[in-house]
Image (tube, rainbow, N blue to C red):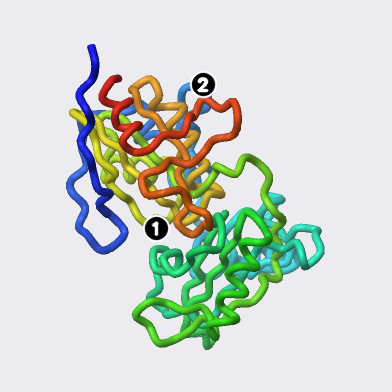
Amino acid sequence: MASKPPQQFVPRTIYGSGQPRPAASASFRHPSFDTASTGESPRVFRPMESKLSQRNPASQQHRGPFPPQHEAWARMIAGFSPNYCGNISLSRNRSADIPEHQNCSLFILNLPADITTRELLANIRNAGRVYATHINAPEPDKGHGTCAAKVIFFERPAAEHLFDQCRGAGGFAMAGRAERGRVIWNRIRTAEQGGPRHQTRVLQIAGPAGVVNEPFLTAYFQSKLDFQVDEVLDVGGAAERRVVEYRFGSFRCQAEAARMALAREWSEHDVKVWFGPDPCDIDLPPVGQFSLPPPGSSEGSATRTERLAQIEEE
């Protein structure tokens, strides 16, 4: 039987611009939602180390505004800030052994003290795919009253695009603000990232409305990983199914991990997930176009209308 023509939908921001969140749905619950997995089941996504340590009070006993002195020394020797909270043993958290002209990481100084991930990324356009972001909060006791942000791109040309844009504009411009951030190359270097070009910090998620909604997805992701949200868009839906576009602050350890978790734990509940175009990129597809996967991939590209038609047929 031929399916009915899908309704046309206009994307609607449901989180990221100050809207209140609706109550989370309790209709769907995965066994691993509230408890850390032992990793024994292939269908369960083991929470990231940062989330497991938060669940273990013993691992938090030394947590405070400043790390123990021996930890601070180890971080400084490795080239990190003494207050760095990441894992300095991971190779991709350390400065890459590459020449300066291959560095894909920028550092933006003198940002407003109240800047958010959303505001930071909203002012980056026509540059390239963002690999990771991190905002350093002000440290008044050290005389730092402003924020600083690290912005890492997948490719060097993207970092150069933003650097040149800011140099031509007299700094990093932010809509509605008079101040300008100062952009420099980050001394902690990051090499270009391999992998398919369709991989981004943006996920497009389709499935039952009880699961595919911002409150439920956010609560689920919070049980699995640490992340920042740029924006969440309600793309539309058909019958009892919805499509949500979830824009993370980073691909690294955020969108990539969230996609793995959904694919592993929710595919049997008819939840599907694709990468979407990064609004910070150049040569973006038309509005409603889903990003192209690599040749031979099962993640076929489709317009929003075509994707919603597929959802209704399912």
Question: Is residue 169 visible in the rendered structure shown here?
Answer: yes
Q: Can residue 56 be seen by looking at this rendering?
A: no
Disc 2 marks a residue whose amino acid type is Pro
Q: Secondary structure at mark 1?
A: strand
For the C terminus, the image quarter is top left
Dot 2, crowdedness within 10 Å: few (<14), some or many (≥20)? few
Q: Mark 1 packing: few (<14 Cα in 10 Å), some, or many (20+)?
A: many
Residue 91 to residue 167: above or below: above
- Percent across and percent down for residue 178 are 40, 87
| Closest to the observer, 106 or 300 | 300
Q: Which residue is mark 2?
A: 42
Question: Vertically, is 40 above or below 241?
Answer: above
Residue at the image point whose x is 52% and y is 42% from the top = 256
Residue 174 at x, y = what percent? 42, 77
Q: Which residue is mark 1?
A: 230
Give the number of callouts.
2
Q: Tell me what residue is drawn at x 30 percent, y 38 percent.
A: 243
Callout 2: SS: loop
Quarter containing the N terminus: top left
